[in-house]
Structures are given as structure tokens and as C-alpha cells.
Image (cartoon, helix red, strand yellow):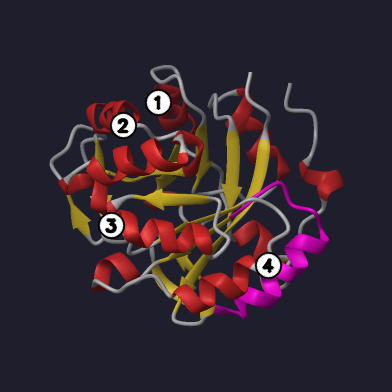
Amino acid sequence: MYQTRVMPCLLIRGNGIVKTRKFKDAVYIGDPVNAVRIFSDKEVDEIVVLDIDASKKGFEPNYDLIAEIAGEAFMPMAYGGGIRTIDQVKRLIRSGVEKVVINTASIESVDIITQVAKIFGSQAVVGAVDVKKTLFGAYRVMVSSGTKETRLNLYEHINRLIEAGVGEIFVNNIDRDGLMTGYDLPLLKSISEKVNVPVVACGGAGNTEHLVMAIKEGGASAVAAGSMFVFHGKHKAVLINYSKELVSCNFK
């Protein structure tokens, strides 16, 4: 049994945090360094930072910003975006990142995953899978921040990532991103029943009940959320929030 983790997921564009809906319509939220400082004070379990432009536009990771963010992260921090080489991973680890999240680069080759797992261990590499449903109900694997569709079979791709050495699978449903209506439980369940590594649910969380359902009904081992932790109230005022008493509820 894996320890249940609840983690904010922050999207980076340039030097700021943004929040998207279905991977589009990015709204500026604020300064990532300050946000991570607040989350550190609130003792979050873990934090995920994803640069949504790096892979899509072929950018290098913003090492200076990542190092500054990591300097405020007194919890495990995972970073994803623009990672293509083992040298980049080494630099990120030196900057204070504990895990790297790899998505787009794994489509062409899983060698980067195998290298990271061999050098730093499987716990240091997360296989991210962005999915989108077709009109016929099938799931498509998407890359480059959801802008490009692949022809990969979802479950075969996930097995390939696991065989390459990822320590966990980060599943993000594009159709639910930013809607705060709940996770895709059937998707999570179908994946968690087939794999032997932790599954992290992302995309759709709006309240504590959604987190609990992802664990109890979806079979996820951990839950990530963005909107839930950066917006507050029915008018979605920007407010960095995280109540450990609220989210560290009974997942058993």
C-alpha cells in the first residue's frame, strides 16, 4: 500500500504561474516562488511544477527560476517541461528538484527514462501521460502540452514507460483540466488496475470529495490539483490555499 499524497500542481509560463482550462485559456495567477513559499509553510506533501511552454516551443528548462523555486520548497518537488537529455536532468537534480516529470520526450524514445532510473533510481522519474477522449469514447495520448495527438495505445504506452523504469505514472485528463468537476474515475480505475506503480491523478479536482473518490474509486495512489489550490470561492478569486486538516482526510 502506497502512502496517499496530496500535491498542488503549478503551471509555469515564463516567470509566472498560470491556470488553464482544458489546457487552453491560461489565466495569470502570480509569482511561483512566493506560491511555493506559502505551500511550504502549509506543509504540503509534495509539489509538482510544470512548464507548459518548454516542450511545445522547444525551450530548455528555466534553470534559474527552477533553482529559486526549489530553494523555497521544503517538500519533495517534481519538475516537468522541456526535458530531453540526461544532462538536463542532472542539472535539475543539482538545482534541488527531486523528481523529473517526462512526457513528450518519452514518445520518441524511452531511453531518457531508462538513463534517469539507472543513475538516480526509479523514484526520481515520473512518466506523465496527457489524455483526451475522442467522440467515440477512446482515449488519445497527447503531447506538447496537449497540442499534438499521437497514435499510441494508452495502456501499451503506459506499460512501455513502466518497463523503461518510471517510478510512478502521472495521469492528466485534458478534458477535465480546470473544470473542478471531479477526476475521470473510470480512466483512473482502468489504469490503476493494470499497473504495479503508483498512479497520480490530475485534472478536474474541485473539492476534498473529489480527492477521496480518486483514491477510493479510481484506485489512484496520489492526487494532484491546480485550480483547487489557487482559487477560492464561487467567483474563483486568486488565493493560494491548502488546508492540511482538510485534505489529509481518511482515504482508507
Query: Callout 2: few (<14), some (14-19), or many (20+) C-alpha neighbours within 10 Å?
Result: many
| The quarter of the displayed image where residue 88 is located | bottom left
- The residue tagged 2 is 158
Element class at badge 2? helix
Residue at image x 82%, y 53%? Answer: 243
Q: CA distance from mark 3 to mark 4?
A: 26 Å
- The circle on residue 191 is 1
- The residue tagged 4 is 36
Does residue 41 appear left or right of residue 52 in this picture? right
Marks 2/1 in contact by CB < 8 Å: the verdict is yes
Q: Earlier in the sequence, mark 2 or mark 3?
A: 3
Q: Can you say which quadrant of the picture contains the N terminus?
A: top right
Q: Is residue 29 magenta?
A: yes
- The residue tagged 3 is 85
**Residue type, mark 4 in image:** Val
Query: Callout 1: few (<14), some (14-19), or many (20+) C-alpha neighbours within 10 Å?
Result: many
Residue at image x 70%, y 68%? Answer: 72
**Residue type, mark 2 in image:** Ile
